[in-house]
């Protein structure tokens, strides 16, 4: 029996991978414009990092982590999200001492969660995210949200909905927490075991339960917005004012609860409203986490960020029928006739590549017609034909595949002559 790919993973093949490369390049360019620098962290970390940062009441920690014991008896986990690793690196490398503050970082790489595979959702997925650490200015909340929205728009998406909420500061969250406990406690036995466990530990997570989302108490649960103190209200109003100034439309949803325990103040999600996208509409989620750095051993440091699945983004592109404006063209394809010509094209191919051009040749000794078909398949801009007759006069025939024009170039200065044609 042939070995097959693990469930919940995927092979990204040529023809499809170019879409990924386009999105990744756009993300990189956007981050450069917004002055975010790339960070690369390990794929696995000590399990304790995620227990302390993501939260032991979350579905990620309780049900979805890929954890193992290494040969030294240490508990390790394949990273389920990117923020915790960035926070750990921020502390370990003393980035809080950098002259330029806030520290603005981005990452792009594989994450791992053991969950039921479905359209656009995998057990190994690629997450792009940004983190801004060291500022509690609401303007940077708006900046982070605008960066995420910009990337989706660069991908051609139009059916987008931004939903925001405030989880308030610690004082506001504590008041809301007490109100939630009072609300759910008399009938908590009617809820699932997860919700029952969360009642005392983190009752806010009950609102995010998928099993009990239709329970009547969910609709009447006290809203966090009713418990925001004056400082939290002003902060949230400022974020909204900045988004409005940037021309970014949004909706305030007091029921929005992010799935991680370290959020406070601003929380947001970007959703796709495209027809046929699926039941799970969330593309991206993020928010402010002013207590995370302290929780895992660092100094008091405010932060905000988001994470987005590239798979989900591409699924939304497909649902909208958007076309990513990337080109996959070969600069030159060499067609050779005869053994000597074949040997010479090996040399010319290398020279052209060294000069910075993409180039290819036939390696299967095909007939000239089949070689031209191969040039069409790789979308070659030019085809350079070299046979015995051309070799005798030290020439090579170059055809522009778009215009049909042909020119003879001297073999001795082929690269420089080709450069004039191509550029």
Image (cartoon, rainbow, N blue to C red):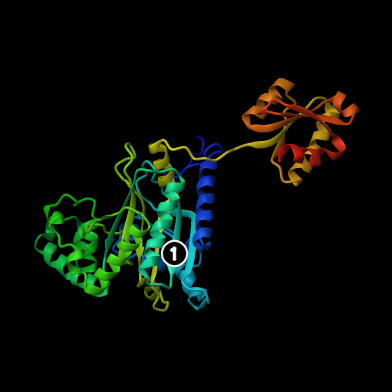
Answer whether residue 43 is visible to the viewer in this image. no
Classify the position of the C terminus by image quarter: top right
Can residue 262 be seen by looking at this rendering? yes
* Residue drawn at (28%, 63%) of the image: 57
414 relative to 251 in the view: left or right: right
| 126 in relation to 233, above or below | above
Q: Is residue 28 above or below residue 384?
A: below
Residue under circle 1?
Answer: 131
Q: Nearer the viewer, residue 9 or 347?
A: 347
- Residues 33 and 38: in front is 33
**Residue at the outermost front position:** 245
Left or right side of 250 for 35: right
- Whole-percent x and y of residue 225? 20, 64
Q: Mark 1 packing: few (<14 Cα in 10 Å), some, or many (20+)?
A: many
Percent from the top left, x then y, of residue 336?
78, 28
The correct choice, above or below, for 140 with respect to 356 in the image is below
Residue 406 lies, in percent from the top left, at 75, 27
Counting the numbered discs, the total is 1
The answer to whether 348 appears left or right of 402 in the picture is right
Q: Secondary structure at mark 1?
A: strand
Residue 175 lies in quadrant: bottom left
Q: Residue furthest right?
A: 392
The percent position of residue 3, horizontal first and vertical second, equals 51, 39
């Amino acid at each position: 029996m042939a070995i097959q790919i693990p469930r919940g993973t995927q092979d990204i093949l040529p023809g499809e991978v170019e879409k990924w490369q386009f999105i990744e390049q756009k993300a990189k360019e956007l981050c450069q414009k917004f002055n975010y620098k790339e960070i690369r962290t390990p794929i696995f970390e000590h399990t304790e990092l995620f227990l302390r940062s993501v939260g032991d009441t979350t579905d990620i920690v309780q049900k979805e982590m890929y954890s193992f014991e290494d040969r030294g008896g240490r508990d390790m986990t394949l990273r389920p999200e990117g923020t915790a690793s960035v926070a750990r690196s921020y502390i370990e490398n003393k980035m809080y001492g950098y002259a330029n503050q806030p520290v603005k970082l981005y990452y792009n790489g594989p994450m791992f969660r053991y969950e039921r595979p479905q359209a656009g959702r995998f057990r190994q997925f690629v997450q792009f995210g940004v983190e801004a650490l060291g500022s509690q200015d609401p303007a940077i909340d708006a900046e982070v949200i605008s960066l995420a929205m910009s990337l989706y728009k660069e991908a051609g998406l139009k059916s987008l909905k931004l939903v925001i909420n405030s989880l308030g500061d610690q004082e506001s969250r504590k008041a809301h927490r007490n109100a939630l406990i009072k609300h759910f406690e008399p009938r908590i036995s009617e809820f699932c075991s997860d919700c029952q466990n969360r009642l005392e530990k983190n009752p806010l997570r009950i609102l995010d339960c998928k099993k009990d989302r239709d329970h009547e108490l969910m609709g009447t649960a006290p809203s966090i917005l009713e418990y925001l103190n004056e400082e939290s209200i002003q902060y949230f109003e400022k974020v909204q004012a900045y988004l409005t100034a940037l021309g970014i439309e949004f909706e305030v949803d007091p029921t929005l609860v992010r799935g991680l325990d370290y959020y406070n103040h601003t929380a947001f999600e970007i959703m796709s409203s495209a027809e046929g996208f699926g039941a799970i509409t969330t593309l991206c989620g993020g928010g402010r986490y002013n207590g995370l750095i302290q929780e895992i051993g660092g100094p008091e440091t405010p932060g905000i960020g988001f994470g987005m699945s590239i798979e989900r983004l591409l699924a939304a592109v497909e649902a909208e029928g958007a076309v990513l404006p990337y080109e996959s063209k070969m600069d030159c394809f060499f067609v050779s006739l005869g053994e000597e010509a074949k040997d010479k094209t090996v040399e010319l191919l290398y020279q052209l590549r060294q000069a910075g051009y993409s180039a290819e040749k036939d390696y299967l000794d095909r007939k000239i017609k089949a070689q031209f078909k191969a040039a069409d398949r790789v979308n070659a801009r030019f085809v350079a034909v070299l046979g015995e007759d051309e070799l005798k006069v030290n020439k090579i025939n170059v055809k522009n595949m778009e215009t049909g024009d042909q020119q003879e170039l001297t073999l001795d200065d082929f690269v420089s002559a080709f450069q004039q044609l191509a550029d």
